[in-house]
Amino acid sequence: MKRGWGRILALVLIGLVMLTGVASAQAGERVRNGGFEEGFVEGVGVGWTSFNNGGDIAYGFRSDEWDPAVFEGQFSQLINMHTTSVGGSQKDRYAGIYQVVDVVPNARYMFSLYGLVRSTEGTEGQSSYNYRVEVGFDFDGGTDPWSVTEWIEMDRWREHPMDRPGRFDSFARGVTATSNKLTIFVRVWKKFPTVGESAVVNLDAISLLGPAPVGVVPAVAVDVPMLPETGVTNVLPFLGLGLGLLGAGLTGRRLLSARR
């Protein structure tokens, strides 16, 4: 069943930007394989690189084609962290993926992604918000996740039981490039030690829309407004009707192709 949340998010973002008077610009998709449809190498989506910070915990990366765990297309990126085979773990364990993209210095970009958090505990209340997703950027194109100075936590993303996933949560934010490279880091944060617990996070439809460098053809060319420096989460469905007219001419697979 197609998910309408992606369309609603796109329209809400456009409406919010138009209200702020931010001008639109010709934009293209800068992320490679943000929908994870191009395949995987050793469990990690082509174009992406995995990382973790070790410790007494097991990490896993693989493709996921279970329909409830895929936002769009046929696949999503699954990241697993568990202590089912160890006596306990340290606090602050991390596992994630990153990608370096070509950008235009001082240009504005719109970053967005969708994610689904599941755990053996079943809810964020039961796990005390133990499993969170964070996004960070290296504005010089660096590949060291531990050098990122600001991480944005998806603090309102919900947590679901392993076998009963709910709908995907979303996040979007305006980003200004400061060099010709920008690295996108997405990581799962396990805050507290556990014994015998497991968490799974599915990531899908990761996107960075904005100007392509000279001589680089965008994978998808679209006309969308550039976001201000704010994030948007937890889309309000009732705004979709009022903003529907704004999306009549919007094109682009990432913003208009969505499930449930």
Image (cartoon, rainbow, N blue to C red):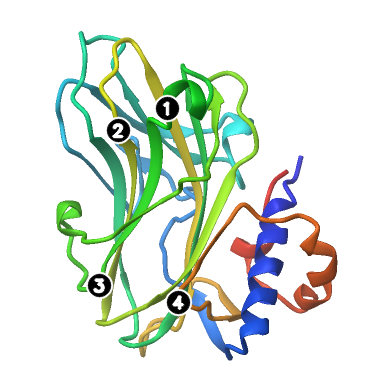
- Measured in 3D between alpha carbons, the distance from the residue under mark 1 to the one under mark 3, in whole angstroms, is 32 Å
Badge 1: residue crowd in 10 Å (few <14, some 14–19, many ≥20): few
User: Dot 3, crowdedness within 10 Å: few (<14), some or many (≥20)?
Assistant: many
Q: Say whether disc 3 or disc 4 marks the residue closer to the N-terminus.
A: 4
Does 50 sit left or right of 142 as displayed? right
Kindly identify which numbered label has been placed on residue 139.
3
Q: Quadrant of the N terminus?
A: top right
**Circle 4 SS class:** strand
Instruction: Say if mark 1 contacts mark 2, CB within 8 Å.
Output: yes
Q: Left or right: 137 with respect to 222?
A: left
Which x, y percent locates residue 85?
26, 9
Question: Label 4 vs label 2: CA separation?
Answer: 30 Å
Q: Earlier in the sequence, mark 4 or mark 1?
A: 4
Gap between marks 2 and 3 measured at Cα = 26 Å
**Location of residue 73 in the rendering, given as x and y in whole percent from the top left corner:** 61, 46
Disc 2 target residue? 191
Mark 2, other Cα within 10 Å: few <14 / some 14–19 / many ≥20: some
User: Going from the N terminus, do you reach mark 2 or mark 3 first?
Assistant: 3
| Quarter of the figure with residue 158 | top right
Looking at the image, tell me whether mark 1 or mark 3 is earlier in sequence order: 1
Tag shown at residue 109: 4
Q: Which residue is mark 1?
A: 128
Q: Nearer the viewer, mark 4 or mark 1?
A: 1
Percent across and percent down for residue 86 are 21, 10
